[in-house]
Image (cartoon, coloured by chain):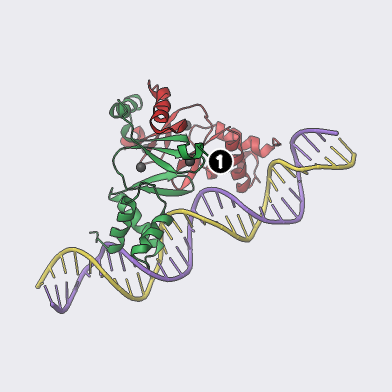
Chain colours: A red, B green, C purple, D yellow
Amino acid sequence: MSRNSEQRKAVLAVVRGTTCHPDAAWIYEQTRKEIPNISLGTVYRNLRHLINDGEILELETGNYKRYDGNIQNHYHFKCARCHEIYDVDLELDNVININNEVAHKTGFIVTHHYLEFGGICKRCRET
Amino acid sequence: MSRNSEQRKAVLAVVRGTTCHPDAAWIYEQTRKEIPNISLGTVYRNLRHLINDGEILELETGNYKRYDGNIQNHYHFKCARCHEIYDVDLELDNVININNEVAHKTGFIVTHHYLEFGGICKRCRET
DNA sequence: AGATATAATGATAATGATTACTAATAAATT
DNA sequence: AATTTATTAGTAATCATTATCATTATATCT
Ligand SMILES: [Mn+2]
Ligand SMILES: [Mn+2]
Ligand SMILES: [Zn+2]
Ligand SMILES: [Zn+2]
């Protein structure tokens, strides 16, 4: 059974405390402000643990992984210039039916879907 | 300007000749059947080149990247058990409008979107 | 066709993110 | 307080991908 270590609580607090979809290195730097001698391996280990427990989400973004403390269903926008990831709260009428539609067409069990938009964000557009 | 080397043609043919969304190692093995002494670095170099030219697509899938010779707009289904990626040809009524909707809501320039479904594929379900 | 310029190659070293290892520590339970 | 064992810090190892560099081959130009 899992033990609620100070390190795990600190990592979870950092991931939940931002909307910037940070990577492990950033989470490590932030966590060090609370626990200066925490090791990078501990950060990775706890991130994996929290993912397995369903407490945070992992985003697959090319070279390195990013993490999301918001486990509610929502979408993302990734800027091609600054690579920042923004949350997109979108009320798609057919979002709920879309999984069933694919399940019906393919015969697969469809449990979820990821939707990511791409382009240029407002800040990058104005520079 | 780019030179159409035998190696580049072979890599492109391999990626176009399958629907299995292969990784670099698999493409390397297949290309070696035509060019036995091709190097893995050359495969990577050409994959990157072909991506920059818009001739193939790169899929961000966790540990390693996968490639797709089908550059038409289509969606994917990733099986959580066997990790295979299937194409999903889906007629979303408002596929074109969905980008505009996000653009309008956010003020971003939205050029594209990726949609990936997850669950258990038919073959894995039956075993 | 032959000479030229340089993009591309093969071989290998380097990089960077993530994971594995291990002796020491600390959270939960009795 | 004693016990159990999950977790940690520190470090080594792994794995996919990229960089380096001397050599080769492709496109272009006489
Ligand atoms: Mn998010
Ligand atoms: Mn595809
Ligand atoms: Zn941006
Ligand atoms: Zn499967």
B124 or A119: nearer the viewer: B124
Q: Residue at x 52, y 41 (%)?
A: B81
Q: Is mark 1 within 8 Å of ligand 1?
A: no
> Residue visible at 58% across and 43% down?
A28
Q: Which residue ends up furthest to the front in the rendered image? A: B126
- Residue C2, compared with residue A108, is above or below; it is below
Q: Quadrant of the N terminus of chain B?
A: bottom left
Viewer-proximal residue among A71 and D10: A71
User: Which chain does the numbered disc 1 sit on?
Assistant: A
* Image-quadrant location for residue A29: top right
> Dot 1 lies on which element?
helix
Which residue shows up at 36% across the image and 27% down it? B106
Q: From the image, tell me which residue sits under label 1.
A: A27
Estimate how packed mark 1 is, as few (under 14), some (14 to 19) or many (20 or more) residues with alpha carbons within 10 Å.
many
Residue B101 versus residue C28 in the image, above or below: above
Residue B47 visible at all: yes
At label 1, the amino acid type is Ile
Number of on-image labels: 1
The quarter of the picture where residue A55 lies is top right
Where residue B95 sits: x, y (%)? 31, 29
Residue B121 visible, this orientation: no
Residue A50 location in percent, x, y? 60, 36
**Place of residue A45 in the rendered image (x, y in percent of width and height, measured from the top left):** 62, 44
Q: Reply above or below: A84 against A70.
A: below
